[in-house]
Amino acid sequence: MESRTVTRVLSVASECAPLVKTGGLADVAGALPGALAGAGVEMRTLLPGYPAVMATLEGAEICARLPDCFGGAARVIAATASGLDLLVLDAPHLYDRGAGIYLSDTGRDWPDNPERFAALSWVGAEIAAGLLPDWRPEILHAHDWQGGLAPYYIARGPAAGQVRSIVTIHNIAFQGLAPASRLSALKLDSADFTPEGFEYWGQISALKAGLIFADRITTVSPTYAEELLTPEFGMGLQGVLMVRQDVLSGILNGIDTSVWSPELDPLITPYDTPAGKAANKSALRAEFGLPEAEGPLCVVISRMTEQKGLDLLLQALPALTDRGGQLAVLGSGDPAMQAAFERAARHPNVAVRIGYDEALSHRMMAGGDAILVPSRFEPCGLTQLYGLRYGTLPLVALTGGLADTVIPATPATLAAKPVATGIQFAPVTAQALASALARLCGLYAQPKLWRQMQRNAMAQPVGWDHSAAAYAALYKGLLGITT
Ligand code: ADP
Ligand code: GLC
């Protein structure tokens, strides 16, 4: 056992807030380095050199050149941006393109996504093996399938046994599949193309490679860590996770309270008690063209995908609107679902914005009475955490991180000294959601109780402190360091 203070970790991520974001992974990758700094961890983040990333770099310095990196020349650039200590893989043939970071203009995955993120993972493993003259990590921490091959490349390369690896599952629905014909293009050894390796029903799975070859596996809530072991949630990888159960754990995400705190938020009328929401609520109603109403103003800020259960909300909506409640939605994704929400917005108490709008999401969080998260599965979920912080009570499905972060209103939690912070429903059906919406309206009609729940919610510890300490302990445990 060794005793010292700083642990060097390379985080390998395909998105990172505030530079480039499609979902919560970016928030987590962006917040972890700062959260861990106080816990004796020096984290650098390896990101693809997308145009949005290249445009924001400060103090850029080329620290490695790779003449042939998955089909073209590339460089590793050390730089900072928005306070993050970055290593950027500048590979124009892979990342310098318009449209989305994962999807082309057609709305489909870029055909070379396997190579694009294999390259990121491979360069991560090269950095672990000593590619950079002046910095080498002790641990590589990969996120989701996009980083999934990094633990494999480490295990089969010169850093094997020297640098430890961790893979974090943010969403097992995305597994990084590629046809077997890409084996050599992805620098993979066909000897590992087996069920015990990264083979998955005849295809290559980058996520499975991470799950098999990483020293530790984490996911973003304790409940999701348990759910992943079941066929319902494991999405075909439950067997692999059962085998590796001893190295799997769940560490809950936090939120960046310097960005998401109603008393500090420059995008809203700041407040530190529930009463302070009133001005934000009037402004939000005006912005969405919603009239005054008796019932709660509910908000949704979400990707529109099967995962998020918003089709159930469309079915259950009369349970809210019939009781004088209102709904304001911000989201984008599945075109059919976007259209269905636009149709629902013909109701005078329903309003929808299709798109992605960070500033509007803050105004909705501040102006809403409740935030709805009816997900079929939710590894952690961040919007319910913002909701707690802003006194915008979360109504959530009883699954994953939603189960771990909301104290549901029940007779016991509403007794003499109420501790409830929101509402949970199960099973995840339109019917159960409808009855939860009815309960929400019932609670909202009791202003004293509602305000108490808001105060409870706003007092919840939703920052990174606790989880950062858990990651730091995981890293140090992996290196056998005592503090
Ligand atoms: P997921 O990562 O599965 O999408 P999370 O709840 O973990 O779910 O994170 C979603 C993040 O993306 C949150 O920060 C949320 O505010 C943000 N977000 C989602 N959709 C939008 C949108 N249309 N406009 C602005 N922010 C959005
Ligand atoms: C994923 C999950 C979400 C989680 C986020 C960050 O996108 O869907 O539940 O909060 O990753 O870990």
Image (spheres, helix red, strand yellow):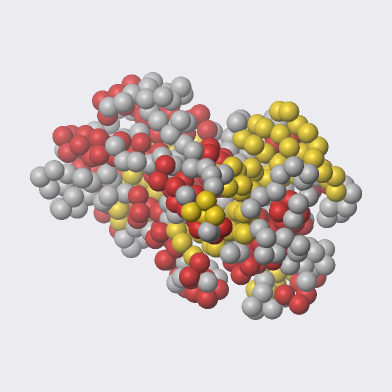
Horizontal side of residue 158 vs 400, given as left or right: right
When the figure is inspected, residue 344 is found, relative to residue 154, above or below; the finding is: above
Q: Residue 211, position in %: x, y? A: 59, 66
For image coordinates 71% across by 41% down, the residue present is 87
| Residue in front for this viewpoint, 255 or 314 | 255
For image coordinates 41% across by 24% down, the residue present is 264
Task: Report the residue that reaches farthest toward the left.
Answer: 416
When the figure is inspected, residue 19 is found, relative to residue 304, above or below; the finding is: above
For image coordinates 82% across by 44% down, the residue present is 64
Residue 327 appears anywhere in the view: no
Q: Residue 71, position in %: x, y? A: 86, 54
Q: Residue 401, position in %: x, y? A: 40, 54
When the figure is inspected, residue 440 is found, relative to residue 195, above or below; the finding is: above
Q: Residue 194, position in %: x, y? A: 69, 78
Task: Report the residue that reaches farthest toward the right.
Answer: 67
Horizontal side of residue 353 vs 152, given as left or right: left
When the figure is inspected, residue 26 is found, relative to residue 291, above or below; the finding is: below
For image coordinates 76% across by 77% down, the residue present is 191
Residue 159 appears anywhere in the view: yes
| Residue in front for this viewpoint, 164 or 32 | 164
